[in-house]
Amino acid sequence: MTAFVSNLRRRLAVLGVSDASSYRSHDFRRGHAKDLQVSGASLFEILSAGEWSSPAFLKYIDACELEREVALQSHLDELSDEEG
């Protein structure tokens, strides 16, 4: 276990967070992916921020919402191409 994880768990325990011993540094990566999605970030931005090169990020975000966003952006791009 890294010093960061030990420190994180100790601080969470002091704050009274239940299951403080189960938290990992990876939880920040997952939370950040979800926060980015909720704020409207593109798939590219989410992948870049998490430095993902595999579909592992899909475990952390709402895949249905992601599909809707990608489909919507694709249609908007098509409309923009037709107008321009």
Image (tube, rainbow, N blue to C red):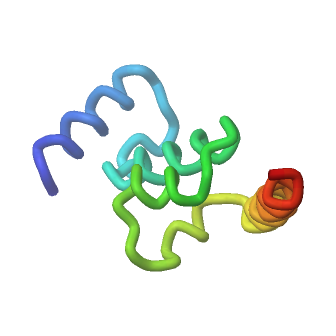
Point out the image quarter for the N terminus: bottom left
Q: Is residue 80 visible?
A: yes
- Left/right placement of residue 35 relative to residue 68 reads left
Instruction: Identify the residue at the far top of this view.
Output: 15
Relative height, residue 46 to residue 7 (above, below): below
Relative height, residue 13 to residue 48 (above, below): above
Q: Residue at x 65, y 47 (%)?
A: 37
* Residue 13: % across, % down: 37, 30
Foreground of the two, 59 or 41: 41
Instruction: Identify the residue at the far bottom of this view.
Output: 54
- The quarter of the displayed image where residue 65 is located: bottom right
* Residue 58: % across, % down: 60, 70
Q: Residue at x 26, y 32 (%)?
A: 10
- Left/right placement of residue 64 relative to residue 16 reads right
- Left/right placement of residue 6 relative to residue 75 reads left
Foreground of the two, 2 or 33: 33
Q: Residue at x 36, y 47 (%)?
A: 21
Q: Residue at x 38, y 74 (%)?
A: 53
- The quarter of the displayed image where residue 6 is located: top left
Q: Is residue 65 visible?
A: no
Instruction: Identify the residue at the far left of this view.
Output: 3
- Left/right placement of residue 40 relative to residue 73 reads left
* Residue 31: % across, % down: 52, 45
Foreground of the two, 73 or 82: 82
- Tally of marks: 0
* Residue 8: % across, % down: 28, 36
